[in-house]
Amino acid sequence: MTRKQLLLIVASAVLMSLSFHPIGLHFLAWFGLVPLLFAIENIKPSFVFKSGIIFGFLFSLFSLFWLVFLQIEINIKLLLLFGLILMFLYFGLYYGTGLLIVNKIGLWFLPFILAGLEFIRGIGELGFPWLSFGYSQARYPIVIQQVSIYGIYGLSFWLVLINVILYKLIKLKKIEYSVMLAIIFGLPLLYGVLRIKEPVGEFISVGVVQPNIDPNLKFTKAMREETFNRLIYLSEKGGKITAEKTDKPFDIIIWPETAIPLFLQFPGKYQEAVYELSNRINAPILTGTPIYNSQNREIYNGAVLIEPKKGITQEYKKMHLVPFGEHIPFNNYIPLFKKIDVGGGDYASGKEYKIFKSKGLKFSCLICFESIFPELSRVFVKDGADLLINITNDGWFGKISGPQQHNDMAILRTVENGVPLARSANTGISMIVDKYGRVLVETALFKEDFISRRISIERDRTIFQIIGHIFPILTLLFVTVVLVCKIRFQKKNKRVI
């Protein structure tokens, strides 16, 4: 590998990482892979593989460097640093494998390969679909409408295809590539323009509370009273402002993940205070809270709905837990893992795709990073949810880019499923998004705030809702068939020779 090739690889890693937050120059993803494609032309397979590993390692390092600043205990941080190096290498292996296959079957297959590999990276208990290329476009509503057809991995496919065509155009300077680029780039944008319409149908009033509580102090007994008082103050203040404007109560008020860091299900002064608040403002409150199951003696990271005059009526237990943060993966199968303590929670995983129902509104709750898994939201909406709610506590991520990246990923869930989303984050970013992925209102980071909007809950039945992840599965099958045929053909030719 020459110095020039290495510089080209680094350039691509920098460009692609800059298309994500904290810089957020999203258009760079349209051509960010082109230097990498020039770097890998006409080199041996072993160097192609190494090029992919270097690109993947640097791209993930530059984009996820904020993980180093997670607000966790210092002894856990040493373990985290080791884990991050492994994770960056893990990213590198995906891109190394992808480019190695490209070297075997041709550059035009790169969009198919990377879209399929991104899908694989998001599967299972250790799935981590963060930094899928498509998420770089979250702030371009016209661009992201195409995910209503084939989902986030289809958007990544489109971005990689644009890069491949642009590379061919620069290298070969043929007019047909200019025409191809115009068509491939323009058609999804035209679809986006035609799809976005003014909201109609039934409207609901949504209020979102952002209390801005230091996550390191939130669970201490001394901070409990202040946390609770701030939640009540912001809810009442927001409720009064809305009542003065519309003379109608909220259809739902949302508090963040573990807003109440105790078991709200048990009677006591905190439960009584929330009940009284719900009665006073005449609005249901969805709040994050731990849930205890006395039958199996398990604790869940959950959410409960408090309704006026009724109290707690429904609950949801988080299903997709943060590995090594909320539980140790595979500890049910490997008993030794149960003895590992990485300083996080020890939650059980919920099993029910819960649809909350209140005042005619049907909604589902995504807790923390459940919002980054497309299939979870798809099932919720398929089961009847008219609104997706995401509650989270991103204060652990610090002030750099983690909260912004997490926030943008949630936006794509609206377009994929044709429903709006409301997001309450303890320290931000909280937001309300319509079904076209347009952010109607959002908060600043680490600021106490209350936001509200009236939003349409008229659902769009999207193609993605019907077919799910058929697209990336087909790309994987297609690449596999082509690769097998290519290998067999080469073996056959060797025997003839």
Image: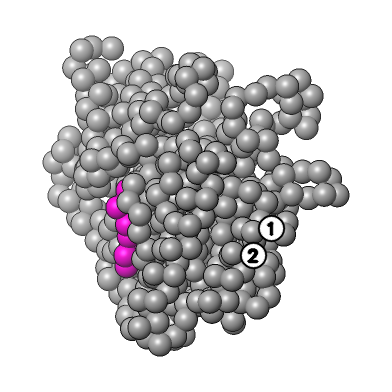
| SS for dot 1 | loop
Instruction: Say which residue label 1 marks.
Output: 268
Q: Is residue 282 left or right of residue 234?
A: right
- Residue occupying the point 35% across, 20% down: 54
Q: Is residue 119 left or right of residue 114?
A: right
Visible in this render: residue 422? Answer: no
Give the quadrant of residue 71. top left
Q: Are there few (<14), some (14-19), or many (20+) residues within 10 Å of tag 2?
A: few
Residue 201 colored magenta? no
Q: The residue under label 1 is which amino acid type?
A: Gly
Give x and y (percent) for residue 44: 36, 16
In the image, 149 versus 388, the foreground residue is: 388
Q: CA distance from mark 1 to mark 2?
A: 6 Å
The reply to whether callout 1 and callout 2 are in contact (CB within 8 Å) is yes
Bounds of the magenta span?
437-445
Quarter containing the N terminus:
top left
Give the number of the disc on residue 272.
2
